[in-house]
Amino acid sequence: MFLRALLLVLTGIVVATHSHTERRGFITGNDLRDDPCRNVTFIFARGTFQPGYLGLVGSQLCDVLKVEHPGQVSCQGVGPAYDAGLDNLKEPEDTTDVGINEAVSLFELATQKCPKSKIFAGGYSQGANLMHGAILKLSKEVKDKIRGVVLFGFTRQKQFHGQIAGFPQDKLKLYCYEADNICHGGGLIGLEHLSYAQEAQNASDWLWSRD
């Protein structure tokens, strides 16, 4: 209960600092399912308790991608089967198989519906665990469509040595602040773990450099 309360309080602080355009992004993270294909499909898994399908970090990154390349990017968050709940962290993968499989289905949908589109992907905190698990399950054909993956606050990055097995290391970028205890395998939640939205510009630049 204390962990949940702390998360909600700290998340509320971060939410209060974000712009209207970011809050709008929480609602619109269903482009792949609802809209025509674009040059790039961006698939993102949000962190625990984060709003909408994209959450704070995914929403900010989506906004930057779309502003810099108008009309070229579709943003798709993992949901609704993935609920980003706290109980998910009790599972072996620190997220649920339901969420992992939903992400896999989104990658497959992107490949089938939009075969000419490139895929960018990412995840934050629990969502980074989910994205790691999903990419492990993808076929080589689908993996080859992915140009770049950004993981923020990946809580299992030490366990997996900062890698996704069978996925090219030059297509993966990790954001893990030195002071982020959670990202380094600890259990203390601080503001550093909730501050990765500020890396959106850097992540966007890196993703486009993979194009």
Image (tube, rainbow, N blue to C red):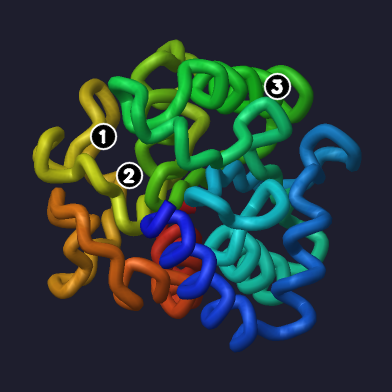
Find numbered disc 2 in the image and state the secondary structure of the residue it sits on: helix
Secondary element type, mark 1: loop
- Residue 111 lies, with reference to residue 58, above or below; the image says above
* Helix, strand or loop status at disc 3: helix
**Quick check: 89 left or right of 57?**
left
Q: Position of residue 122 (x, y in %)?
A: 47, 48
Numbered badge on residue 140? none
Q: Nearer the viewer, mark 3 or mark 1?
A: 3
Q: Earlier in the sequence, mark 3 or mark 2?
A: 3
- Of residues 130 and 200, the one nearer the viewer is 130
What is the number of the mark on residue 168?
Answer: 1
Q: Where is residue 70 shown, x and y percent of the image?
A: 78, 68
Instruction: Kindly identify which residue carries mark 2.
Output: 171
Label 1, label 2: how far apart the Cα atoms are: 6 Å
Residue in view at x 69 percent, y 32 percent: 116
Instruction: Tell me if label 1 and label 2 are in contact, CB under 8 Å.
Output: yes
